[in-house]
Amino acid sequence: MKKTPDNKNNNNGRRTDNRFDKRNRDGNKLQQIVKKRTCRFCEYKIEYIDFKDEKRLLKLINEQGKILPRRITGTCAKHQRILVSSIKRARHMAILPFVSEALK
Amino acid sequence: MIQRTNTYETLFIVNPVLEDSQIDAIVTRTKELIEKHGGVIKSLEPWGRKRMAYIINKKNNGYYALIEFDAPAESITSLERFYNLEEEVMRHIIVKLDKKTLLAKSLKKEQAIRLSEANKEQGIQ
């Protein structure tokens, strides 16, 4: 339901839609926290992502076994390209699942 | 003429139902094949029996072995052929390691050592 001036104030005159009015205990408006993500591989200057490194690769796939997109992990384009190929190699060698066992 | 060689690593999964001696035989045969075609084994890491992420050939486990070696590019076709003909090898992969990755690999070890040292120092302070 789109908010119109009518239904915004129809709850006994109280404003129900307070999405834009979040306040903390002191009554100050909360600042939106913008977290700047950096590529986890650039951070440590990693040039080579090993397909045998199961622990590292597991962090970059979801529970279904899908490769997480860059917008979620914050990986840079260069490293995502390397990462994708090593995940696919790991899948071929049954180190990582194509589809997670729990969902089968 | 001096033959140009590249560095490769190969990981393969052997049927885990076989006895250890039979598995060893396959691993040594691969090793010998690489050496026969002018390759030099740099390292051999038998991972042993490991649970696989999904079922291959109706099996849950597999015997993994990893070999890193230097070899001329022509020898890879014969290694690939060997893997395909060998029935007990369930999966295989051959990856060429370029200069960059080799450098990164050697640096990685150094970095790990340095990191652990740095952590110790911080702990003291």
Image: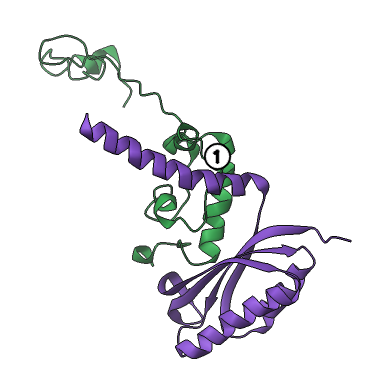
Question: Quick check: A74 above or below B77?
Answer: above
Q: Nearer the viewer, residue A16 or A76?
A: A76
Q: Quadrant of the N terminus of chain B?
A: bottom right
Q: Nearer the viewer, residue B116 or A10?
A: B116
Identity of the amino acid at label 1? His
Residue visible at 51% across and 81% down in the picture:
B57
- Within 10 angstroms of label 1, few (less than 14), some, or many (20 or more) residues? some
Residue visible at 44% across and 51% down in the picture:
A57
Residue A87 position within the rendered picture, expressed as x and y whole percent measured from the top left: 52, 54
Mark 1: secondary structure: helix
Q: Nearer the viewer, residue A20 or A51?
A: A51
Residue ID for mark 1: A79
Residue visible at 46% across and 77% down in the picture:
B62
Question: Quick check: A7 above or below B109?
Answer: above
Q: Which of the colour schemes (rainbow, by chain, secondary structure, one colour) is used?
A: by chain
Q: Colour of chain A?
A: green
Residue visible at 41% across and 44% down in the picture:
B112
Residue A24 position within the rendered picture, expressed as x and y whole percent measured from the top left: 15, 16
Q: Colour of chain B?
A: purple
| Residue B42: quarter of image | bottom right
Question: Quick check: B55 above or below A38?
Answer: below
| Residue B8: quarter of image | bottom right
Residue B123 position within the rendered picture, expressed as x and y whole percent measured from the top left: 23, 35
Left or right: B78 as drawn, with respect to A41: right
